[in-house]
């Protein structure tokens, strides 16, 4: 499992408009519920103040964000799976309306009642004929205290055995798992019910806009594919780590390219780039491949397909280290965001940090260039939708599609996942997104669904000529 854990806060919901979302097994739904939280706060006594932008609303929102993020752990837990037959996740944005404010458990604390409304992703199978489903909601009533309240010595039995620090706690939190002292508790755990209402309404088959992708899309006649593998073991690599799962995944994918007669045109093994652009010894590997492919349903001339594959340390820490900083990933990622027609990333999501646009050197997307971004990492749905559409110029411009996963992904399926998508753009058959997403699910094998889906194809109108 690929996890890098950092505390994060969700951003304020701007719009919950139902836009296109298609997953082979997943559905996007509006999640609504009411809950209460006992949080540190003083100096405010009325709900109207909390519902009005200002300092008090910001303070309250920070505490509610801290509480709500625990749903990430609950929704992907074994006990949740057993209860409803699915795992799930919440989206990157949601709306909070405060309903009541009372004195809290002690001085300097307030008890807030609120209504939550935001997007989420679950398996299609749990919804009834009316496209509705109910799910259990389990939240720590005092989110700032719950880790210590539930710890036993230096160990907390209510989260993952290995990721057991307070910073990791919320992502794996399950108050009803075996051994947790909170099991069945309703004094420290808010227990309620949430309503899911499906909002993915697209029924017609949609295609990637191959006419743009394989036409003059800013790269003349070239179809530019950039593939990034992130090391799973994110330590300082002074040379390539051939035992790492990502290294093996890269080799498997490259074998697929060689089997399709792609020719290697460039190779750089064992390097890293510093902030100033100096190239030194390191653990990164770069290779480039090229081949002409016929897309007869679209055009008569063959397309020059160029593929760049990079294996690197994609962690935020790599770029920020004082000793042997490694900027290689960022140095190749930024040009890919600007130039690639199809970008595939497989590695740690860093809970949004590894591909956080705010952490990259400032650059601008080409708003007129049509692109497809595939983010195959742990729970990328909550992090890599809105920010990329906004940076690209807005969801309605029809120049971006983003493929995300709703659950943690396994490194054992990295190569098959990446090949599943990549090969559909290399076989010349011009498949629909529905086919691509179903085959992506199939490529998981026994690992089950990651709730993968494509977002943003609601305006795609291109279809192949019959």
Image (cartoon, rainbow, N blue to C red):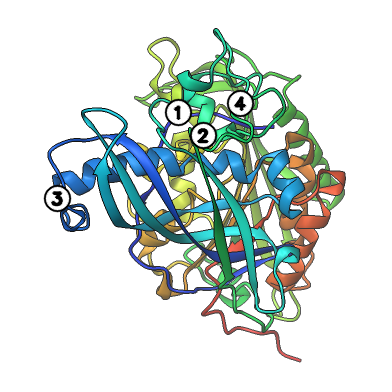
Q: CA distance from mark 1 to mark 4?
A: 28 Å
Left of 118 or right of it: where is 293? right
Label 2: which residue? 350
Q: Point out the frontmost of discs 1 and 4.
A: 4
Q: CA distance from mark 1 to mark 2?
A: 8 Å
Residue 425 lies, with reference to residue 462, above or below; the image says above
Point out the tag, 2 or 3, that comes first from the N-terminus: 3
Point out residue 33 in the picture as x, y percentages from the top left corner: 48, 58
Left of 400 or right of it: where is 50? left
Q: Residues within 10 Å of mark 1 (few under 14, many from 20)?
A: many
Label 3: which residue? 54
For the residues labelled 1 and 2, say whether their Cβ atoms are less than 8 Å apart. yes
Point out residue 71 in the picture as x, y percentages from the top left corner: 53, 44
Residue 201 lies, with reference to residue 148, above or below; the image says below
Mark 4 falls on what kind of element?
A: loop
Q: Quadrant of the N terminus?
A: top right
Residue 283 lies, with reference to residue 104, above or below; the image says above
Q: Residues within 10 Å of mark 3 (few under 14, many from 20)?
A: few
Residue at x 40%, y 25% (from the top left corner): 145
Point out residue 359 in the picture as x, y percentages from the top left corner: 36, 37
Mark 3 falls on what kind of element?
A: loop
Mark 2 falls on what kind of element?
A: helix
Label 4: which residue? 158
Point out the tag, 4 or 2, that comes first from the N-terminus: 4
Label 1: which residue? 316
> Farthest bottom residue?
466
Left of 54 or right of it: where is 172? right
**Residue 271 placement: quadrant:** top right
Q: CA distance from mark 3 to mark 4?
A: 35 Å
Q: Is residue 124 visible?
A: yes
Q: CA distance from mark 4 to mark 2?
A: 22 Å
Mark 1 falls on what kind of element?
A: helix
């Amino acid at each position: 499992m690929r996890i890098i854990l950092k505390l994060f806060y969700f951003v304020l919901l701007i719009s919950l408009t139902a836009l296109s979302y298609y997953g082979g097994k997943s559905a996007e739904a509006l999640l609504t519920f009411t809950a209460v939280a006992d949080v540190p706060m003083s100096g405010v006594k009325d709900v109207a103040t909390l519902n009005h932008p200002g300092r008090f609303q910001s303070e309250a929102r920070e505490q509610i964000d801290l509480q709500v993020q625990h749903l990430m752990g609950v929704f992907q837990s074994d006990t949740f799976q057993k209860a409803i037959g699915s795992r799930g996740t919440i989206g990157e944005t949601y709306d909070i309306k405060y309903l009541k404010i009372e004195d809290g458990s002690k001085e300097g604390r307030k008890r807030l009642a609120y209504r939550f409304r935001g997007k989420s992703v679950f398996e299609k199978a749990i919804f009834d004929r009316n496209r509705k489903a109910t799910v259990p909601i389990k939240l720590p009533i005092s989110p700032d205290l719950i880790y210590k309240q539930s710890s036993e010595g230096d160990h907390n039995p209510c989260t993952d055995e290995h990721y057991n620090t307070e910073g990791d706690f919320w992502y794996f939190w399950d108050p009803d798992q075996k051994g947790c002292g909170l099991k069945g508790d309703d004094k420290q755990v808010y227990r309620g019910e949430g309503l899911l209402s499906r909002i993915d309404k697209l029924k017609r088959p949609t295609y990637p806009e191959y006419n743009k992708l394989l036409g003059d899309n800013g790269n003349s006649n070239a179809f530019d594919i950039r593939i990034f593998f992130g090391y799973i073991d994110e330590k300082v690599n002074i040379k390539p780590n051939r035992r790492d799962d990502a290294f093996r995944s890269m080799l498997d994918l490259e074998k697929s390219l060689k089997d399709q007669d792609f020719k290697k045109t460039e190779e750089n093994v064992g390097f890293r780039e510093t902030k100033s652009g100096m190239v030194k010894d390191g653990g990164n590997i770069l290779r480039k491949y090229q081949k002409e492919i016929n897309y007869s349903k679209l055009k008569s001339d063959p397309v020059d397909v160029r593929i760049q594959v990079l294996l690197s340390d994609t962690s935020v820490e790599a770029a920020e280290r004082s000793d042997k900083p490694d900027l290689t990933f960022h140095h190749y990622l930024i040009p890919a965001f600007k130039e690639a027609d199809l970008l595939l990333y497989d590695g740690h999501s860093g809970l949004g940090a590894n591909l956080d646009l705010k952490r990259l050197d400032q650059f601008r997307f080409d708003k007129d260039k049509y692109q497809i971004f595939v983010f195959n990492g742990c729970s990328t749905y909550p992090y890599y939708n809105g920010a990329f559409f906004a940076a690209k110029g807005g969801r309605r411009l029809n120049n971006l599609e983003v493929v995300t996963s709703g659950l943690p992904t396994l490194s054992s399926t990295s190569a098959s996942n990446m090949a599943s998508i990549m090969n559909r753009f290399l076989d010349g058959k011009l498949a629909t997104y529905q086919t691509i997403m179903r085959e992506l699910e199939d490529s998981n094998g026994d690992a089950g669904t990651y709730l993968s889906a494509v977002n943003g194809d609601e305006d795609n109108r291109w279809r192949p000529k019959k």
